[in-house]
Amino acid sequence: MSETNIPTVYNPSEVENKWYQEWESKKYFGATVEKEKTPFCIVMPPPNVTGQLHMGHALDNTLQDILTRWRRMQGYNALWVPGTDHAGIATQAKVEEKLAKEGQTKYDLGREKFLDEVWAWKEQYGNRITTQLRSWVLPATGIGNASPWMKAAQRQCWKYSYAYLNKV
């Protein structure tokens, strides 16, 4: 007896988006302090906001995902903390490249307008990178990466820098 309602090709978007949203709403990616467990933490190096992720990012994040899950399965209080770029040097280079194609330089714009361009680039491409990171699936498990996105923060956020420098 053959099943006629089973598709011949797997379409991940039909399945994974639904489950990912449910997992996020139930805070399955969240982390709580469990003092009786040994802590294990990996801080995800934030990619530069240069457009989109590549295979190097995929490899790096897959390895971090594997290590975090492995430690969690061993009973550690495991946390994988993501971050996003703050529109830094690599982003500046991309914006300057874009301006050059338009026949301009950052000096033509002046500091404030150039910074506006950098933040506009970050707004356009920063969300793309975060969305890509969130939707990557660990091939071996078929489960979206285990990072608690609600803890994501820009690595140059003044609050975190201040807290670190002042041991708050």
Image (cartoon, rainbow, N blue to C red):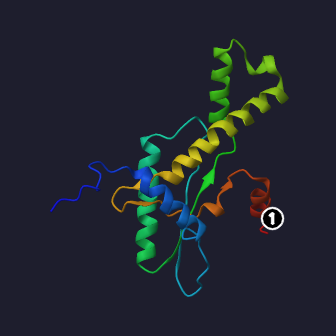
Q: Is residue 45 left or right of residue 10?
A: right
User: Could you tell whether 47 is left or right of 73 in the image?
Assistant: right
Residue type for callout 1:
Asn
| Residue 103 screen position, x and y as percent | 69, 11
Q: Identify the secondary structure beneath mark 1.
A: loop
Residue at the outermost top position: 103
The percent coordinates of residue 8 (x first, y second) are 26, 49
For image coordinates 53% across by 53% down, the residue present is 134
Q: Vertical placement of 127 versus 40: above or below? A: above
Above-or-below relation of 151 to 57: below
Residue 47 visible from this viewpoint? no
| Quarter containing the N terminus | bottom left
Q: Which residue is mark 1?
A: 166
Q: Quadrant of residue 104?
A: top right
Q: Position of residue 21 (x, y in %)?
A: 55, 61
Whether residue 58 appears in this view of the structure is yes
Identify which residue is drawn at 37% across, 49% down. 11
Quadrant showing the C terminus: bottom right
